[in-house]
């Protein structure tokens, strides 16, 4: 079964790598660089204002570490057919699931290392300890995550929801005690207690698993939910066959469509606007990007960082909306419309312009609320308006021409 998991993992990684080239494109990397740079600068400025032995530092770090320990779910890679075809191999599934735990640990390991390191300056300010104590803290976090994954494996067996909740509560309570001892008593003590907790969980859960059978339905459903979350993230950047867009009536938005004059000149504009408002693919993407950009801008106080982030998010929103141009290419009737093809391009450009002005207006309000100097806010708003016009008049036609080539 170990080799069977390796085969599935190879196929899974090959599929994920195909999508990753769309996710980690130049635009996304550029946005991440600006966001991380801006947040890092803001974080460093805040740390300079904190007093030595900052009282709230340790509680904040404790809660932060507990939250990031939740990142990462066991990747069983289970499939629907396993409930029938792999069922006879259940006695050997322990080897399969142990290999799943080992694979599932790598992503949380990287996240814990990065976010744990990010929180270390606050730990140093709050405790007065040296930065070298990071070694003890990161070992503690790694061990706690191992026990968390081991517990997730146990929940794949036929146990009651009440028992699963009791075990997760026990894990959360013991993890709270371990992190508290490391922050308030001694960093090395946290590593030792984390090791004891992990060994105890492995010993007790190994004993309990011998008396129960796998819940195949639960395992398959949890894997489906895990993959659905991954596909939802990838769907922000490219089309994913595993994510099917839904259509809703949304009668309350009909007044917006009534603003479009129903003439032959607006055929495609009405069609695209109706698709955007009633479909979930592009409207959901638009709302999510606006929310993320809005939250980030609300907490930025520096003029240049706020300008860079707002400009990048407007560009990113517009860039993700352009593919709506091909939304109806598969429909035969649209090719029979007695309207010129140039009307499609004009309709997409108009729709993108309107939506970008809406996003720019929201960002403008948040920028004015966040920046202490209102003149700086007005300058950013002017830049955003110019960007929207240039994007719609120059970049959109260029991209559409390239899509048709």
Image (cartoon, grey):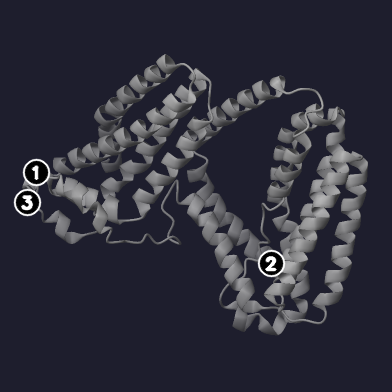
Report which residue position mark 3 lands on: 338
Q: Residue at x 65, y 27 (%)?
A: 43
Task: Looking at the picture, tell me which residue is in the foreground, 164 or 227.
Answer: 164
Quadrant of the image occupied by residue 340: top left
Q: Residue at x 80, y 23 (%)?
A: 52
Quadrant of the image occupied by residue 365: top left
- Whether pointer 1 and pointer 3 mark residues with C-beta atoms closer than 8 Å, the reply is no
Task: Looking at the picture, tell me which residue is in the foreground, 247 or 300.
Answer: 300
Position of residue 17 relative to residue 81, above or below, is: above
Q: Residue at x 70, y 20 (%)?
A: 49
Q: Position of residue 387 (x, y in %)?
A: 33, 25
Task: Looking at the picture, tell me which residue is in the foreground, 329 or 302.
Answer: 302
Visible residue check, residue 327:
no
Report the disc number at residue 38. none
Give the alpha-carbon distance from disc 2 to disc 3, as whole Å.
55 Å
Report the disc number at residue 265. 1
- Whether pointer 2 and pointer 1 mark residues with C-beta atoms closer than 8 Å, the reply is no
**28 sits to left or right of 244:** right
Which class describes the residues within 10 Å of circle 1: few (<14), some (14-19), or many (20+)?
some
Report which residue position mark 2 lands on: 5
- The local secondary structure at tag 1 comes to helix
Mark 1 or mark 3: which comes first in sequence?
Answer: 1
Question: How many numbered discs, if any?
Answer: 3
Extreme-front residue of the structure: 55
Closest to the camera, between mark 2 and mark 1, is: 1
Give the alpha-carbon distance from disc 2 to disc 1, as whole Å.
57 Å
- The local secondary structure at tag 2 comes to helix
Give the alpha-carbon distance from disc 1 to disc 3, as whole Å.
10 Å
Location of the N terminus by quadrant is: bottom right
Mark 2 or mark 1: which comes first in sequence?
Answer: 2
Which class describes the residues within 10 Å of circle 2: few (<14), some (14-19), or many (20+)?
some
């Amino acid at each position: 079964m170990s080799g069977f998991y390796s085969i599935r993992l190879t196929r899974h990684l090959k599929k994920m790598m195909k999508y990753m080239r769309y996710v980690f494109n130049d635009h996304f990397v550029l946005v991440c660089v600006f966001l991380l740079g801006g947040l890092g600068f803001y974080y460093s400025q805040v740390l300079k204002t904190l007093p030595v032995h900052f009282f709230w530092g340790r509680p904040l770090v404790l809660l932060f570490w507990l939250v990031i320990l939740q990142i990462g779910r066991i990747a069983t890679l289970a499939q629907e057919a396993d409930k029938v075809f792999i069922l006879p191999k259940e006695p050997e599934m322990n080897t399969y699931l142990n290999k799943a735990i080992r694979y599932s640990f790598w992503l949380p390991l990287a996240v814990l290392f990065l976010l744990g390191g990010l929180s270390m300056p606050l730990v140093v300010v709050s405790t007065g300890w040296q930065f070298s104590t990071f070694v003890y803290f990161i070992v503690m976090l790694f061990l706690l995550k191992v026990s968390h994954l081991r517990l997730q494996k146990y929940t794949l067996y036929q146990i009651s929801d009440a028992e699963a909740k009791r075990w997760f509560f026990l894990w959360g309570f013991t993890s709270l005690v371990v992190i508290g001892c490391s922050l308030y008593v001694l960093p090395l003590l946290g590593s030792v207690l984390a090791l004891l907790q992990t060994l105890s969980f492995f010993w007790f859960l190994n004993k309990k698993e011998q008396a129960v059978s796998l819940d195949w339905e639960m395992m398959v459903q949890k894997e489906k939910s895990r993959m659905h979350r991954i596909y939802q993230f990838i769907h922000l950047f490219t089309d994913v066959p595993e994510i099917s867009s839904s259509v809703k009536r949304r009668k309350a938005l009909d007044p917006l469509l009534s603003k479009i004059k129903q003439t032959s000149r607006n055929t495609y504009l009405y069609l695209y606007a109706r698709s955007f408002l009633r479909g979930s693919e592009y409207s959901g993407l638009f709302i999510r990007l606006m929310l993320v950009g809005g939250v980030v801008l609300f907490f930025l106080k520096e003029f240049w960082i706020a300008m860079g982030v707002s400009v990048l998010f407007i560009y990113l929103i517009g860039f993700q909306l352009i593919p709506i141009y091909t939304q109806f290419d598969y429909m035969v009737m649209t090719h029979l419309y007695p309207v010129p093809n140039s009307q499609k391009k004009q309709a997409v450009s108009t729709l993108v312009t309107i939506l970008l002005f809406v996003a720019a207006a929201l960002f403008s309000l948040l920028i004015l609320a966040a920046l202490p100097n209102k003149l700086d806010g007005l300058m950013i708003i002017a830049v955003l308006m110019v960007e929207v016009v240039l994007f719609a008049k120059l970049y959109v036609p260029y991209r559409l021409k390239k899509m048709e080539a």
